[in-house]
Image: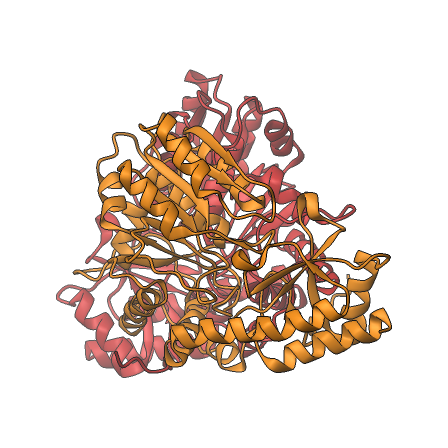
Chain colours: A orange, B red
């Protein structure tokens, strides 16, 4: 067996995540590991919570990073909030809405589906109609920013309907957090999960989540145990809680949390509004160039995510070979399509630290040279 | 809000994990992030599998790191292998045996408990008796190296009994992998999970697991879906499988996997037998010193883990204050007791990169000065 050390190239990450990571965050990542119950580390954990509350725009006490990727954050929301038999309305307009359905079913939910075409936002009217027919639904689940299509849904309007029926909301904010406005408290969202590797530009592997007091109340009123031990948030709370002694649940991913602290501090110092504006500005620049090159957007302008540019390939352009060429010749990663859009669409990310002029310029020039225009 | 960058001190980690991490591994951790579907990264994933097979001493094709801590690795074994109603014999001689019971129950198992005193190994006789009374048990689950007590159980003998009854084994090797002999194929173990932050001396957050062909067959014969989407290994397999195109399941923790690759490569280059011997040698040195200072071992010599020294505190020594003093004055972390042993016992780790002469010397001198002998 001859295995050598692995030295990855320095890629420019303009896919659907992970996004580029600043050297500040990579440096923080590699600082010396301390114990997960070290008083200094616990102090840092409190700061991570504070910074996450800012990013989510919430005062929710229960705001922590799950020690696993975004899919585990999604599952944490479903297994904690759903009890077998609960009726759950799930909005499906892409890959992650479908994943929500799978999670809800495995949690024993009775699922009511609201389907929308891929690339369209969730229809507020359809959700209103679904509630009118299912006024006993306990939860509404939807994806704020669909990473598979680049469509942004109106989280505030959807939450408003759920509140009318006294239902809780589970919201996928994996790609939205830090990239477009997301206001957990103002919009009254109840259980929101995200990922570290998108607009936060931290290493992949963590999933920030926040639960409202109403979500916590539903968990506390459960009559059945949460089916997952690892994701049982009433147990996790004992470790992340600010009061008294921390109790051991699992060993926290210490170094990844250093990186998250640094990435969130960067976002705080820039200011959320400035970060949102930067994503919007870079999107405008990229869009102009892409359209000149013959790419057409999948999503209508009014609900288009600036941080995830989903575009149809110009006629005759080969998907896999061209992406491989961009990777080999320019160290540039762009994302392919998922599911029904595979082979037809690219997903060009401008997430977090990747949303900057030099990336836009490189991407457009590399495409220009490759397409031969 | 005034939050500063977090600069952790350089601790010497001699608790129950995380262990000290070499600068090689920390450097690998902070290399530039690439995409989780990047061909170069997928090549590295194949190497991680190969290196893990070596560490586990197995040819099992399904040998991968779960993208979450050891507790998630434990849960992955239980939720995949157990179907509701399956009878499972669980051996409980410490915290992690109890955690196995909780996982089994949440997976719908009918649990038969085999209890042993904390600090004792699992009784092979009791397990034989449990099978004699429950010959329809489908799974035997036990902890190879109990991190809460420092006791090593005879995995080979326990597995042998299970095989007589055609039952599968689930084995917790969180603290044993890399520190003491563990031979998955020779001992015919079926589902084994470990952690990255113990004797592998990688950052916390990953859980290496391996499933035997028999374990895979049981998963493939399931009539009910795995309750966890994130931990459903038939889905995960599509991403880690060596054949054909990798399908997206979740975003792999790219940088942590760089670190695991580097840590496993270090173990491979040292050689497993040499690593086991080093742990044994350092244990002998530490033991002599500890006994001179009045510490008494919790576990009998013949089943004592070299990498986790569980010792009763000498009369009059204050647990929490003394540990805080060691941390403040020497940057030295030793672990406290868990559960019934809290306040009475310390757990002094010699795991992976921490198992070296300079750590033993520092620990003994710091204790000598602190105790005043």
Q: Nearer the viewer, residue A313 or A21?
A: A313
Q: Nearer the viewer, residue A106 or B259?
A: A106
Give the total number of marks visible in the rendering: 0
Q: Quadrant of the C terminus of chain A?
A: bottom right
The residue lying at 37 percent from left, 49 percent from top is: A157
Q: In terms of image quadrants, where is residue B55? A: bottom right
Place of residue B300 in the rendered image (x, y in percent of width and height, measured from the top left): 35, 50
The residue lying at 54 percent from left, 61 percent from top is: A305
Could one spot residue A125 in this view of the protein? yes
Place of residue B178 in the rendered image (x, y in percent of width and height, measured from the top left): 55, 58
Residue B16 appears left or right of A312: left
Q: In terms of image quadrants, where is residue A244? A: bottom left
Using the image, determine if residue A146 lies above or below residue B356: above
Q: In terms of image quadrants, where is residue B257? A: bottom right
Using the image, determine if residue A55 lies above or below residue A101: below
Place of residue A80 in the rendered image (x, y in percent of width and height, measured from the top left): 34, 41
């Amino acid at each position: 067996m001859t295995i050598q050390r692995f030295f990855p190239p320095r890629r420019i990450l303009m896919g659907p995540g992970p996004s580029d990571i600043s050297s500040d965050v990579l440096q923080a990542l590699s600082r010396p590991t301390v114990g997960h119950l070290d008083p200094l580390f616990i102090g840092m954990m409190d700061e991570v919570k504070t910074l996450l509350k800012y990013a989510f725009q919430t005062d929710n006490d229960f705001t922590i990073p799950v020690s696993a990727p975004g899919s585990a954050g999604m599952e944490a929301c479903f297994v904690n909030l759903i009890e077998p038999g609960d009726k759950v309305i799930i909005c499906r307009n892409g890959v992650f809405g479908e994943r929500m359905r799978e999670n809800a079913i495995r949690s024993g939910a009775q699922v009511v589906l609201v389907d929308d075409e891929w690339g369209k936002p969730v229809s507020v009217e359809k959700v209103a109609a679904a509630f009118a027919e299912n006024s006993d639904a306990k939860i509404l689940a939807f994806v704020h920013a669909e990473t598979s299509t680049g469509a942004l849904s109106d989280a505030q309007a959807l939450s408003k309907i759920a509140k009318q029926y006294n239902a809780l909301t589970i919201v996928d904010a994996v790609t939205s957090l830090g990239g477009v406005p997301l206001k957990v408290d103002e919009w009254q969202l109840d259980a929101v999960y995200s990922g570290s590797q998108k607009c936060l530009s931290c290493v992949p592997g963590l999933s920030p989540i926040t639960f409202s007091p109403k979500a916590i109340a539903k968990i506390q009123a459960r009559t059945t145990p949460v089916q997952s031990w690892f994701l049982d948030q009433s147990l996790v709370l004992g470790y992340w809680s600010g009061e008294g002694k921390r109790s051991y649940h699992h060993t926290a991913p210490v170094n990844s949390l250093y990186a998250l602290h640094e990435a969130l501090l960067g976002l705080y110092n820039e200011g959320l509004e400035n970060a949102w504006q930067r994503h919007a500005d870079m999107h405008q620049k990229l869009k102009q160039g892409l359209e000149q090159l013959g790419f057409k957007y999948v999503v209508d302008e009014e609900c288009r995510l600036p941080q995830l540019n989903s575009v149809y390939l110009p006629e005759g352009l080969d998907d896999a070979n061209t992406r491989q060429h961009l990777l080999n010749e320019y160290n540039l990663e762009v994302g392919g399509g998922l599911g029904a859009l595979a082979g037809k669409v690219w997903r060009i990310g401008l997430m977090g630290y990747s949303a900057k002029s030099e990336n836009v310029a490189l991407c457009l020039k590399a495409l220009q040279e490759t397409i031969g225009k």
